[in-house]
């Protein structure tokens, strides 16, 4: 249940729709093996395509070849992520650390890695070039998407004393097995610089095309994404329960609703024309707009309009909501 007050609302626990796939269920089983090379090849092709329809078609080809159990992982990877953004799970490796991992994982001197990076200006191309010139040019593709995905999660989770060494070890292990093309996109993924030119609308179009037969069903998928902020969950629900199950998706505690951000207009007349000639207006107050969620275990989660978790920054708000006052009463 969601109760709105001003710029925030509180979501109380509710049962998911029958048969719905929960976020936890997305990670319980290992999918059948698929080589990461196929994903990397799709990335390469998407980089070279400019037309939107061509982007959708190439992405649809990748999703069509992806086993059902693996689909959420591939969707996240195409977003340049390994989890929904609101979870706060980030790989976040700096270029310097990837440089060290490449040197340690391939035996290439660090100075040579740095020199190549200065020449290419692109860490992904640097990794690809050095792997190709140091024995990996004819390396067979053995990295599996599931292994890559779980290893990236381990890198993101490494924390505390010795975590830097652990991150280097894990990434170096991937690069030791990667083909040059795989290395290019592993480097870009871990540094948050994938930049394929593919946004969530393109992914939604491709999902609709592949798993419903027509892009005309994209609005159904988009609505579901807007209320759960999790493209992997939308994909899993679609392939396991069909379009009807996606239509039945509801706001769920712990998954922030994507905000509808305003567009600026230069003139009031332009704004009125856009809204059909009439509109309502209200004062805008200074402050932070938050979504407040009460999860099934009673925790209060606060999300900004960028879907960042900020409960720790507002202990007084959390205390207020935990006491049962505020939204929802």
Image: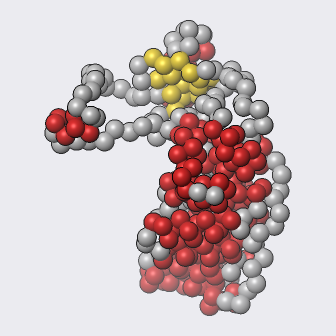
Q: Quadrant of residue 241?
A: top right
Q: Residue at x 83, y 56 (%)?
A: 30
Asked if 312 appears above or below 171 in the picture, the reply is above
Q: Nearer the viewer, residue 139 or 238?
A: 238
Q: Position of residue 103 (x, y in %)?
A: 63, 77
Residue 83 shown left or right of residue 263 in the figure: right
Q: What is the basis of the colouring in this image?
A: secondary structure
Q: Quadrant of residue 251?
A: top right
Q: Is residue 257 visible?
A: yes
Q: Nearer the viewer, residue 244 or 287?
A: 244
Q: Position of residue 104 (x, y in %)?
A: 67, 75
Q: Nearer the viewer, residue 278 or 249?
A: 278
Which quarter shows the C terminus?
top right
Q: Residue at x 65, y 68 (%)?
A: 62
Q: Nearer the viewer, residue 250 or 196?
A: 250
Q: Residue at x 53, y 34 (%)?
A: 257
Asked if 179 appears above or below 253 in the picture, the reply is below
Which quarter shows the N terminus?
top right
Q: Position of residue 173 (x, y in %)?
A: 74, 70
Residue 59 shown left or right of residue 287 in the figure: right
Q: Residue at x 47, y 74 (%)?
A: 49
């Amino acid at each position: 249940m969601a109760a709105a007050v001003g710029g925030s609302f509180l979501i109380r626990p509710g049962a998911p729709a029958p048969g719905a796939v929960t976020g936890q269920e997305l990670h319980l089983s290992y999918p059948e093996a698929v080589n990461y090379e196929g994903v990397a090849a799709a990335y390469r092709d998407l980089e070279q395509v400019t037309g939107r329809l061509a982007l959708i078609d190439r992405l649809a080809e990748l999703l069509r070849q992806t086993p059902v159990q693996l689909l959420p992982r591939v969707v996240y990877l195409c977003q340049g992520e390994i989890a929904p953004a609101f979870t706060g799970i980030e790989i976040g490796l700096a270029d310097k650390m990837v440089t060290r991992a490449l040197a340690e994982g391939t035996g290439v001197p660090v100075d040579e890695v740095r020199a190549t990076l200065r020449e290419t200006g692109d860490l992904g191309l640097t990794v690809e070039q050095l792997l190709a010139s140091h024995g990996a040019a004819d390396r067979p593709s053995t990295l599996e998407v599931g292994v890559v995905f779980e290893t990236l999660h381990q890198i993101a989770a490494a924390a505390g004393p010795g975590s830097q060494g652990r991150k280097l070890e894990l990434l170096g292990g991937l690069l030791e097995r990667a083909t040059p093309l795989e290395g290019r996109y592993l480097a870009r993924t871990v540094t948050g610089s994938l930049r394929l030119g593919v946004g969530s609308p393109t992914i939604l179009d491709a999902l609709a095309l592949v798993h419903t037969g027509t892009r005309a069903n994209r609005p159904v998928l988009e609505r579901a994404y807007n209320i759960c902020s999790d493209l992997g969950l939308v994909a899993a629900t679609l392939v396991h329960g069909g379009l009807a199950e996606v239509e039945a998706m509801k706001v769920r505690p712990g998954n922030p609703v994507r905000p509808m951000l305003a567009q600026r207009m230069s003139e009031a007349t332009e704004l009125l024309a856009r809204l059909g000639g009439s509109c309502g207006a209200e004062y805008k107050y200074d402050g932070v707009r938050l979504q407040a969620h009460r999860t099934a275990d009673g925790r209060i989660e606060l999300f900004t309009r960028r879907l960042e978790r900020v409960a720790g920054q507002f202990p007084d708000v959390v205390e207020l909501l935990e006491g049962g006052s505020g939204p929802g009463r």
